[in-house]
Amino acid sequence: MGVDGPVEAPIAVRTAAELSSTLRLAVMRLSRRLRSQRSEELESLPAPQVGALATLVRHGTLALHELAQYEGVRPPSMNRIVGQLEERGLVERMAHPTDRRQVLFAPTREGRALIKEDRRRRDAWLAQRLRELTPRERETLRAAAPVLEKLTNL
Amino acid sequence: MGVDGPVEAPIAVRTAAELSSTLRLAVMRLSRRLRSQRSEELESLPAPQVGALATLVRHGTLALHELAQYEGVRPPSMNRIVGQLEERGLVERMAHPTDRRQVLFAPTREGRALIKEDRRRRDAWLAQRLRELTPRERETLRAAAPVLEKLTNL
DNA sequence: TATTGTTATACTCTATAACTATA
DNA sequence: TATAGTTATAGAGTATAACAATA
């Protein structure tokens, strides 16, 4: 690998400002493309329901007010959302073991499967794009993946 | 199932499936963090207005129906959105030079400044995160940036 | 007295349908 | 006849306010 810089790269990323800007644009655009790769079953679910279900799958079990906070909506709105998810059999409500005011929600097996299928879809889409890269480009991304991961935790 | 994997030590990205999955997670999480870095002025603007304004800044001048298509809403909805943007002095309407049916919209100087400031904000946030990496890690991202960019165009 | 969830009500946003102007 | 924009109206979603149960 020479010091003369990239030859076939679209944009030379030299300065720190260029790196920020290029990285920001690429990450935002790629995430938009990824987000648009919804599975058909989730396509029919309204976005607020998808968000709440995904959060429940990630966190396991949450009280109504916690779920509302995560999703950035008010308790009455979340009440409606989980009600619809419950009707579809995607989440179930449970009593809190000690605090009888709280109502806990957890995804059902079906709800979990739906989210998992969605992730599988996006992975498949991205995997196909990765196959269209050169081996060298894939190697570059392989090295960068842990760094991007670290970046999200800073 | 439903386990996102260890977070402490970066996962060794070996197989193609691991690369897809790690990259997908990191990109989605990073874009969420970036999106949450809104400037205060844009914070008060409803999301549909922000989206339409950003699209106009990107493309320069668009007819109502084109803007509606880009934003994934119907013409009557976009009509309302640009009306609000016009009230705030962020976009202005112009007559189409040849087709008198069409109404063209373009961002004002103020509208452009608002979007630009927002981008500057996110760049600043990301730049700070990049400074917290090691030089070697930054070099890895520098090499990966053009590849990520290429990925979005496949 | 504070917190959690629920119900009632009003407001905002979007879409469909109908209408006008222009191509 | 088709297309662009606008207006009128209905449906979906969210928030605030008020209320009930529990801590």
Image: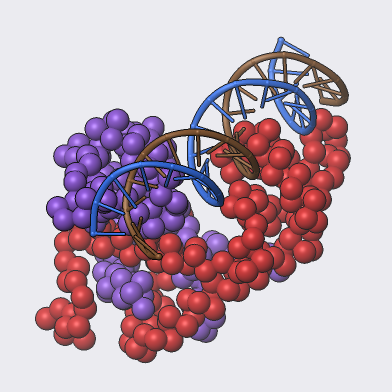
Chain colours: A red, B purple, C blue, D brown
Name the residue nearer the viewer: B36 or A147. B36
Give coordinates of residue A147: x percent, y percent. 39, 66
Compared to B59, does A62 lie above or below?
above
- What residue do we see at 31% from left, 60% from top? A25
In the figure, residue A66 lies in which quadrant?
A: top right
In the figure, residue A102 lies in which quadrant?
A: top right
Compared to C1, does D13 lie above or below?
below
Give coordinates of residue C13: x percent, y percent. 48, 39
Give coordinates of residue B48: x percent, y percent. 41, 44
- What residue do we see at 43% from left, 67% from top? A33
What is the quadrant of the N terminus of chain A in the image? bottom left
Q: Residue furthest bottom?
A: A135
Compared to A11, does A58 lie above or below?
above
Left or right: residue A79 versus residue B56 is right
- What residue do we see at 21% from left, 78% from top? A9
Is any part of residue B31 visible from this angle? yes
**Number of callouts:** 0
Name the residue nearer the viewer: B90 or D18. B90
- What residue do we see at 40% from left, 39% from top? B80
